[in-house]
Image (cartoon, rainbow, N blue to C red):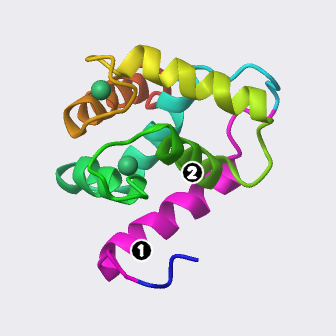
Amino acid sequence: MGQSKSQFSEEELQDYQDLTYFTKKEVLYSSQDGDCTFEDFLDMMSVFSQMAPKSVKAEHAFRIFDFDGDDMLGVADLKQVITKVTGENKLRETEMSWLIQNILEEADLDDDGALSFAEFEHIIDRSSDFLSTFRIRL
Ligand SMILES: [Ca+2]
Ligand SMILES: [Ca+2]
């Protein structure tokens, strides 16, 4: 699967590998079974923020996360992103649905059920705030 076309540059693939490698080690909130919130997702994103230069991260991340290439992050894309970031089978189906619902509630500003690049950028901004507020002092 996914071998038919290569839509990413090597650099982007490297970013993606870094992202998945790094976050797999962290395994997102594994101690909090059944309690995945938008804040958890922001936390994932702040991990990504640490990995990538600010100038490229939003656009690269958006392209990487837009698995079906329709220039929107829909439910299916988010599901894949979360699966890649947390690892296979880390979240139960209900937790996954809950998390996606949370993300869309918070971030889908025009309420069309998917995240545009502008909406995604907004998440990145918020995750940076989240990072600097809660993480960077550690
Ligand atoms: Ca998409
Ligand atoms: Ca939207």
Residue 7 part of the magenta segment: yes
Q: Percent from the top left, x then y, of residue 97? A: 66, 28
Residue at 26% of width from left, 47% of height from top? 58
For marks 2 and 1 on the same chain, the one whose residue lies earlier in the sequence: 1
Residue for badge 1? 14
Residue at 55% of width from left, 21% of height from top? 101
Mark 1 crowd level (few <14, some 14–19, many ≥20, 10 Å Cα): few
Residue 68 located left or right of residue 30 = left
Q: Percent from the top left, x then y, of residue 51? A: 40, 55
Q: Quadrant of residue 114?
A: top left
Which of the image's four quarters has the N terminus?
bottom right
Residue for badge 2? 80
From what the image shows, is residue 20 above or below residue 89?
A: below
**Mark 1 falls on what kind of element?**
helix
Q: Percent from the top left, x then y, of residue 107? A: 36, 21
Instruction: Tell me, yes or no, whether the two marked residues, 2 and 1, touch with CB atoms within 8 Å.
Output: no
**Mark 2 falls on what kind of element?**
helix
Bounds of the magenta segment: 5-30
From mark 2 to mark 1, how far is it between C-alphas?
18 Å
**What is the count of numbered marks?**
2
> Could you tell me the amino acid type at mark 1?
Gln
Quadrant assignment for ligand 2: top left
> Could you tell me the amino acid type at mark 2?
Gln
Residue at 79% of width from left, 22% of height from top? 34
Q: Percent from the top left, x then y, of residue 109? A: 28, 17
